[in-house]
Image: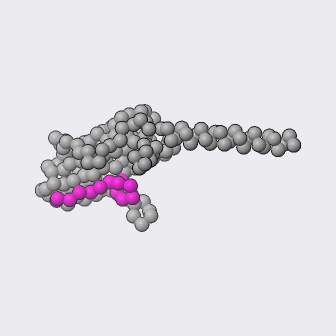
Amino acid sequence: MYRGGKIMRVKAVAAIVAGGMALAIAGCGSNEPQPSPGDVAQPSPEAPPGITLSDARIQLPVVSGRPGAAYFTVSQANGAPHTVTGVAVEMAARAEMHQTSGGSMAPLGKVGIGAGKTVKFEPGGYHVMLFDLDPKLRFSKDVALTVTFEGGGKAVARAPVTTMAGQMEMAH
């Protein structure tokens, strides 16, 4: 009987700990600002002509130490086509462009943008994986997201920092 009581106490403690963790995860980021659809950054002075960034946001991982993600839209209004060769995000040691296709993800070295075209970096398609995130990023309202183009031009936007909890709240 004593052994059964001990098992019941262990199960009860485990249930309480699991419930507390679920509440902590659900509560993270609930007061953080969310980007408004269509938020457009002003073109940077060093951006190639006709390039604009919009809808930028940083998605923090649910579990600390895992990679985060960056999403944004880059548009080429007119002129010659451009090529994105890299992305950097403030407070991320490394950022890599990736593409998800057919259920698998692969890194990309560059992404072309034709004249008059728009490319969306979004879940399930092109996106940027963020590695070795500064723990202070969780407490940041927004950070600089810099897109680098072939030839050295750069476009910069402020990207709100979001969490999965914040994204789930937006869906309700």
- Residue 40 seen by the camera: yes
Pick the front one: 35 or 83: 35
The answer to whether residue 4 is left or right of residue 53 is right
Is the residue 115 above or below the residue 92 in the image?
below
The residue lying furthest to the left in this view is 79
> Would residue 54 be counted in the magenta stretch?
no
The residue lying furthest to the right in this view is 1
Give the residue at x 49% y 44%.
62
Image coordinates for residue 41, horizontal then vertical, percent: 23, 43
Give the residue at x 64% y 39%.
17
Pick the front one: 97 or 4: 4
Is the residue 115 above or below the residue 88 in the image?
below
The answer to whether residue 168 is left or right of residue 143 is right
Image coordinates for residue 68, horizontal then vertical, percent: 43, 46
**Number of disc labels:** 0
Is the residue 48 above or below the residue 105 in the image?
above
The answer to whether residue 133 is left or right of residue 150 is right
The residue lying furthest to the bottom in this view is 102
Give the residue at x 13% y 56%.
78
Q: Which residues are magenta?
A: 115-127
Image coordinates for residue 91, horizontal then vertical, percent: 38, 37
- Residue 89 seen by the camera: no
Give the residue at x 84% y 42%.
3
Is the residue 33 above or below the residue 73 in the image?
above
The answer to whether residue 82 is left or right of residue 99 is left
The quadrant holding residue 42 is top left
Figure coloring = one colour
Quadrant of the image for the N terminus?
A: top right
> Would residue 125 be counted in the magenta stretch?
yes
